[in-house]
Image (cartoon, rainbow, N blue to C red):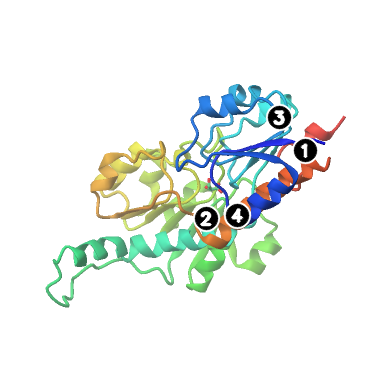
């Protein structure tokens, strides 16, 4: 019997690729670049599955081109690139890769916290430029991390893992989420809930861990940045459009906040040029989950979702389980 056909939009780790190839005929993009929408649409007919990157737009038009498509398996935990409504209407299973990247992304978030407050990237540039003339009492003075207040917006898997790291640094953890924890759980974990505006007022570090949805787009804009302390830092390792990047530039320029550590941007891979000129920003290219172990684990998870559909099972990381009802 012919194997089902699967499109993989970007080169994969060898082990998950072999697992997939055992059960499917794989068309793999071996070029070191993303496929264009047109290329993906042209490749989809006849494919039962697509293993897509979080940066591949899986909108209604693209999904509609896959007449035989049964699954779009995202190689990412975020799935704002998938039109879930369209996938559900077309009875295509949509999946993501939760859990396996939680700690790695939390580590990177903490690297941004440490990096921006202790001016690591700026200090590195300073040394490399040959500007260091010797120990100076006022050289590269930053902000402390320990004993400060860490405001976590979005206390899901990654937000909670960042909170735990903060506790290791003896930080006071406050959080805002659309779902408040049970007070007993809050107490056990030493987490204090605050409404968003209050959290912004009291935090020394505000770190964003919400998914990108119509409700969270520009969750942090001029008004919110205006509530933050002048000495506070904004950290974003969630999705770029959660922050109004223009407003962030203005807030940094006006000294309304002390700095920003960003892994994600509004119009990736473009970065608002003013951010590049600022010394009090740490900017990294969407590498939250970028470790060897985690990237392989993510791909394995995406492959397992496809293999489940091939076996006629509900994929473990299903995002639209309603397609299997009725
Ligand atoms: C994720 O897993 O969502 C990462 O941001 C990669 O897109």
Of badges 2 and 3, the one in the foreground is 3
Q: Nearer the viewer, residue 131 or 254?
A: 131
Secondary structure at numbered mark 3: loop
Asked whether the residues under the numbered discs 4 and 2 touch, taking CB atoms below 8 Å apart as contact, a structural biologist would say no
Any part of residue 196 in sight: yes
Disc number for residue 69: 3
Q: Residues within 10 Å of mark 3 (few under 14, many from 20)?
A: many
Disc number for residue 321: 1
Gap in angstroms between the C-alphas marked 1 and 2? 26 Å
Residue appearing at x 82%, y 34% in the figure? 324
Q: Could you say where residue 229 lies in the image, as x and y percent from the top left?
A: 36, 54
Q: Could you say where residue 169 lies in the image, as x and y percent from the top left?
A: 47, 72
First along the sequence among labels 4 and 1: 4
Residue 23 drawn above or below residue 184: above
Q: Residues within 10 Å of mark 4 (few under 14, many from 20)?
A: few
Q: Nearer the viewer, residue 238 or 316?
A: 316
Residue 151 drawn above or below residue 80: below
Of badges 1 and 3, the one in the foreground is 3
Residue appearing at x 72%, y 29% in the figure? 88
Of the 4 image quadrants, the one containing the C terminus is top right
Q: Which residue is mark 2?
A: 289
Asked whether the residues under the numbered discs 1 and 2 touch, taking CB atoms below 8 Å apart as contact, a structural biologist would say no
First along the sequence among labels 1 and 3: 3
Q: Which residue is mark 4?
A: 14
Residue appearing at x 13%, y 66% in the figure? 131
Disc number for residue 112: none
Of badges 4 and 2, the one in the foreground is 4
Residue 98 drawn above or below residue 56: below
């Amino acid at each position: 019997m012919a194997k089902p056909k699967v499109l993989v939009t970007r080169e994969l780790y060898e082990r998950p690729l072999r697992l997939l190839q055992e059960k499917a005929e794989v068309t793999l993009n071996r070029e070191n670049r993303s496929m264009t929408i047109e290329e993906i649409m042209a490749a989809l007919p006849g494919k039962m599955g697509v293993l897509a990157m979080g940066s591949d737009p899986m909108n209604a038009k693209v999904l509609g081109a896959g007449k035989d498509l049964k699954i779009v398996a995202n190689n990412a935990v975020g799935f704002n690139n998938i039109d879930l409504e369209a996938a559900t209407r077309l009875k295509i299973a949509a999946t993501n890769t939760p859990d396996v990247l939680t700690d790695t992304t939390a580590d990177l978030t903490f690297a941004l916290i440490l990096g921006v407050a202790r001016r690591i990237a700026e200090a590195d540039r300073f040394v490399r430029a040959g500007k260091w003339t010797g120990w100076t009492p006022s050289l590269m003075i930053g902000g402390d991390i320990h004993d400060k207040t860490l405001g976590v917006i979005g206390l899901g898997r990654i937000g909670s893992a960042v909170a735990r790291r903060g506790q290791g640094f003896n930080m006071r953890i406050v959080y805002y989420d659309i779902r408040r924890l049970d007070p007993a759980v809050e107490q056990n974990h030493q987490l204090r809930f605050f409404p968003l505006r209050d959290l912004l007022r009291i935090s020394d570090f505000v770190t964003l861990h919400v998914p990108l949805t119509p409700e969270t787009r520009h969750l942090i804009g001029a008004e919110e940045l205006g509530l933050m302390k002048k000495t506070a830092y904004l950290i974003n390792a969630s999705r770029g459009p959660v922050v109004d990047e223009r407003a962030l530039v203005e807030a940094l320029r006006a000294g309304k906040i002390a700095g920003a550590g960003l892994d994600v941007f509004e119009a990736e891979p473009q970065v608002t040029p003013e951010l590049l000129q600022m010394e009090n920003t740490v900017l990294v290219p969407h590498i939250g989950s970028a470790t060897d172990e985690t990237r392989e684990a993510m791909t394995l998870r995406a492959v397992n979702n496809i293999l489940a559909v091939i076996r006629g099972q509900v994929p473990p990381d299903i995002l639209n389980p309603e397609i299997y009802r009725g």
